[in-house]
Image: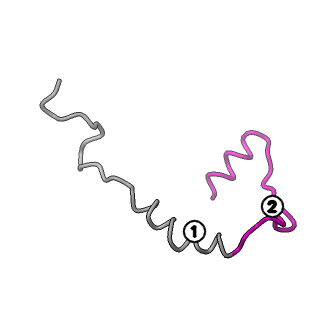
């Protein structure tokens, strides 16, 4: 979050937070998404092999 704050400040923006939640917000749907969808999305990250910043095969030049 600190990096986000610095970026906002650099561009002359401020951190704003709504005073109340949107009427349309569906708390049940939000909790369901957090428990079921987010772990699957987060788990998709692909690890790069150590020492390689390229997706190309080492033999291909």
Q: Residues within 10 Å of mark 1 (few under 14, many from 20)?
A: few
Q: Mostly what secondary structure, the magenta segment?
A: loop
Q: Residue 22, relative to residue 6: is it above or below?
A: below
State how far apart marks 1 and 2 are (Cα).
Answer: 22 Å
- Locate the C terminus and report the quarter of the image it occupies: top left
Which secondary structure, mark 2?
Answer: loop
Report x, y in % for residue 34: 56, 70
- For label 2, the residue is 17
Please indicate whether residue 21 sits to the left or right of residue 5 in the image. Answer: right
Quarter-of-image position of residue 32: bottom right
Residue shown at 67% from the left, 49% from the top: 6
Q: Residue 8, relative to residue 36: is it above or below?
A: above
Report x, y in % for residue 11: 74, 39
- The segment highlighted magenta reads 1-27
Sooner in the amino-acid sequence: mark 1 or mark 2? 2
Residue shown at 86% from the left, 68% from the top: 20
Q: Residues within 10 Å of mark 2 (few under 14, many from 20)?
A: few
Q: Nearer the viewer, mark 1 or mark 2?
A: 1
- Locate the N terminus and report the quarter of the image it occupies: bottom right
- For label 1, the residue is 33
């Amino acid at each position: 979050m600190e990096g986000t704050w610095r970026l906002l400040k650099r561009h002359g923006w401020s951190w704003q937070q709504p005073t109340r939640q949107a009427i349309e917000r569906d708390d049940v749907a939000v909790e369901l998404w957090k428990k079921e969808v987010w772990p699957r999305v987060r788990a998709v990250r692909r690890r790069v092999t150590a020492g390689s910043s390229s997706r190309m095969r080492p033999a291909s030049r």
